[in-house]
Image: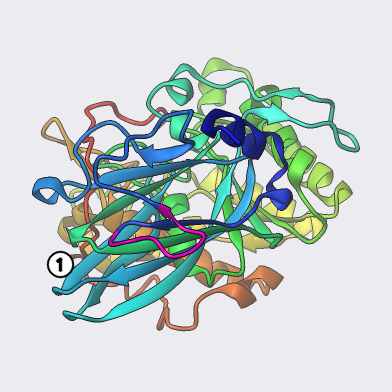
Amino acid sequence: MKPLLLAAALLAAPAWAQPALRFAFDGPPAAGELAVQPDTAYSRERGHGFEPGAPRNAAGQPAFFSVDLPEGNYRVTATLGDRDASDTTLKAELRRLMLDGVRLPAGRSETRSFIVNLRTADIAAAPGVAAGRVTLKEREIASEAWAWDRRLTLEINGSRPALTHLLIEPVALPTVYLLGDSTVADQPGEPYASWGQMLPLLFKPTVAVSNQAESGETLRDSLARRRLDKILSTLRPGDTVLLQFGHNDQKQQRDGSGDAATYRAELRTHAERILARGGVPVVVSSMERRRFDAQGRLQPSLGEYADAARAVAQQMRLAFIDLHAMSLRFYAALGPERSQQAHPVNGGRLDNTHHNGYGALQLARLVALGLRDARVPVAGALRDDLGAISPDQPQPPEQFHVAASPGFTQQRPLGD
């Protein structure tokens, strides 16, 4: 079969019908593997290859390798290691952290697996859901396009990355869906990050994380743009949906289009529709903005919405993660000065709403703690080596390091 016809045939088949794909990046390919050279550029005809930019490992620059695939969940098994010592970080799609700083001595190799969720904007008809499309924002079509295209894209990063073999195979696994605002959504460029981008790192390769949050969103936007419909169209009974809204919903008080009461009603609508499809809704209260007064005391600004989220969870007997309260304890533990290290600086200004990699990872760990404390079934799939998690004893920011992605941005995420 010609390459173009082969690529088209693969995309036409559903994820579960996809054959396993094997790639060799170093040395002659074994039987069944496709050889990938540093200059193997992505093309539609080939169906895989490196995205435009610096070639793999050139001058220590990260590279992006893409494979055309239909939406679904995929287990990615990476073989790492080299003749020399190596240090590899792998991210997927829009900087979702999958493997962090895997360091291997010279001559040693290891295989590591993780799960990547792919999606498109198309909505398939399902019970209670009409066929259609998610109404994407302009930035989702431009700088965030990798979150919605029909490609699995891996960022190969680290001080000395050494990816030698790659196996990609479709899997039917439980999925954790995320809906929320910019503090949850995959952020496309440094220095910004979200807890949703870090959450995949905390799970064993037995669960997929599908982050469908978007910057600037409210519960009302989720309904109007059909983000909830998109999730419901692929949700299977037992799948988990984490709902974290509040930052942008609060602004509806100022424009007169809503208040805490409408927030509660819209949150109930989300939960009811998820329950109707057999899903497990988990209400997450919004983390606070970092605000200290002159005496070093925290000044909460989202308490009314945290209370509303808790009330809905209690009334509907849903799992509840009080990220609002935990974030206050997290900031207090670091104090007015050190807590600045959880937030990005862009254009010389500290952003006290959004987070950098360190802040995002600490919040992701608190979400993991919340899943455990609320006894959400999917918490059983969290990694065993996460160590003790407490908002009162965060990991030291001075010891944090995750390889930075290329593409720093001056564009602040939507919302505040």
Q: Give the side of residue 205 with respect to residue 37, left or right.
A: right
Q: Residue at x 86, y 36 (%)?
A: 126
Mostly what secondary structure, the magenta segment? loop
Whether residue 282 is situated above or below residue 389 in the rendered picture? above
Q: Secondary structure at mark 1?
A: helix
Q: Residue 168's spot in the image, x, y percent?
A: 53, 57
Q: Residue 105's spot in the image, x, y percent?
A: 18, 81
Q: Which of 277/154 is in front?
A: 154
Quadrant for the C terminus in the image: top left
Residue 394 occupies quadrant: bottom left
In reply to whether residue 27 is colored magenta, the answer given is yes
- Tell me the residue that label 1 is attached to: 398
Q: Residue 352's spot in the image, x, y percent?
A: 28, 42
The kind of residue tagged 1 is: Glu
Whether residue 57 is situated above or below residue 219 in the rendered picture? below
In reply to whether residue 118 is colored magenta, the answer given is no
